[in-house]
Image (cartoon, grey):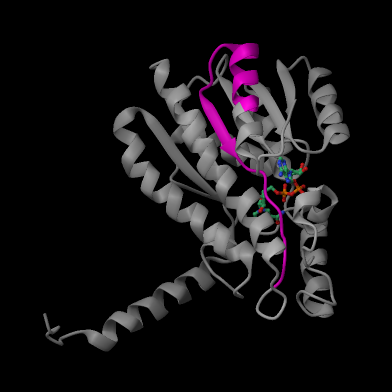
Amino acid sequence: MKDLAGKVAFVTGAASGIGLGVATALAQAGVKVMLCDIEQAALAKAVEGLKLTNADVDGVLADVSLKSELQAAAAAVIARYGKVHIVVNNAGVTGGGGYGAWTDASWNWTIGVNLMAVIWGVEIFGPLMESHGEGGQFVNTASIAGMISGNGGPYNVTKYGVVALSEGLRNELGPRGIRVSVLCPGFIRTQIIDSTRNLPDRFAGVTDASPAAGPAPEALKMIRDRIAGGIDPLYVGELVREGVENDWPYIFTDNEFEPFIEARFARIKEGFDQVRGREPRR
Ligand SMILES: NC(=O)c1ccc[n+]([C@@H]2O[C@H](COP(=O)([O-])OP(=O)(O)OC[C@H]3O[C@@H](n4cnc5c(N)ncnc54)[C@H](O)[C@@H]3O)[C@@H](O)[C@H]2O)c1
């Protein structure tokens, strides 16, 4: 989507981290941005900060893991800006660890925010983008964890889901004038590791990625350190803007994990090699 100035974007998880970086980068290009988040004070601060730069932005509070709240947020975008062209389904949480640390609350919360909210975002905003005939763009935030899976925890499962959803929708929605990109960040300097700060009450019982329940303390410390020293979220926002302008199917932030993804593809190929030349019984 070229000529971003004057277009309208809706960004979830926009009060912090990558979402705020994306909202900022789009606003800098003259896009009108509706920031959506569950964290009221952080949302107000983010909107206020962007308004100081003369950006045309506004905020809407919503828990995106509740479909009704996402529907109300969509209505707020239309009421405020009349139409919407770019939807960034970005809100996400890291709930729960791998095998042995599972709880239903962890699965439900993580699936609700990371996957169902993306599905509903497409379901709710797709028709709104199609209705004006000016074209549209979804950017769905997955992760490198949607390409390689280090454990059987909810986070990776939801991120693989977002990749599958985005790849499939790109085929389905392209002919209807809607583009779909999937964002797969590496380590980005955000507050993701402290996701439980926004845990809705109905998901009480989540096993945080805490040393007692989740990854081993050293692994957790390593992740914290990598995120603390991670890539600037505004840089990620600028990449997303470039991806939107040039319709990139995959938006990666760096090449750190490329060899791991190649190794996964090699293992998949080995699986095919096991059965190559055999005649399947039908
Ligand atoms: N930081 C990283 O290293 C990294 C790497 C790969 C993918 N990601 C993904 O990037 C996305 C953004 O995360 P981030 O790293 O910027 O973290 P962050 O915690 O800084 O920002 C996430 C935002 O989502 C909001 N949010 C959480 N639950 C919500 C809900 N139910 N409804 C609405 N908003 C909600 C939070 O309030 C917060 O503002 C997530 O999908 C995450 O999985 C992050």
Q: Is residue 213 above or below residue 110?
A: below
Tell me if residue 266 is in the magenta stretch: no
Q: Inspect this view and state whether residue 121 appears.
A: yes
Q: Is residue 200 above or below residue 108?
A: above
| Quadrant placement of the N terminus | top left
- Quadrant of res 234: top right
Measured from the top left, where is residue 235 in percent x and y?
68, 42
| Quadrant placement of the C terminus | bottom left
Identity of the residue drawn at 40% across and 23% down:
130
Measured from the top left, where is residue 135 in percent x and y?
41, 23
- Quadrant of res 158: bottom right
Q: Nearer the viewer, residue 177 or 50?
A: 177
Q: Nearer the viewer, residue 94 or 112?
A: 112
Instruction: Please indicate whether residue 263 sits to the left or right of residue 101 in the image.
Output: left
Tell me if residue 91 is in the magenta stretch: yes
Magenta residues span 72-97
Identity of the residue drawn at 45% across and 35% down:
246
Measured from the top left, where is residue 244 in percent x and y?
50, 34
Instruction: Please indicate whether residue 44 sits to the left or right of residue 187 in the image.
Output: right
Identity of the residue drawn at 85% across and 35% down:
42
Q: Is residue 52 above or below residue 248?
A: above
- Quadrant of res 46: top right
Measured from the top left, where is residue 181 in percent x and y?
47, 42
What is the number of callouts on the image?
A: 0
Q: Inspect this view and state whether residue 245 appears.
A: no
Instruction: Please indicate whether residue 127 sits to the left or right of residue 269 in the image.
Output: right
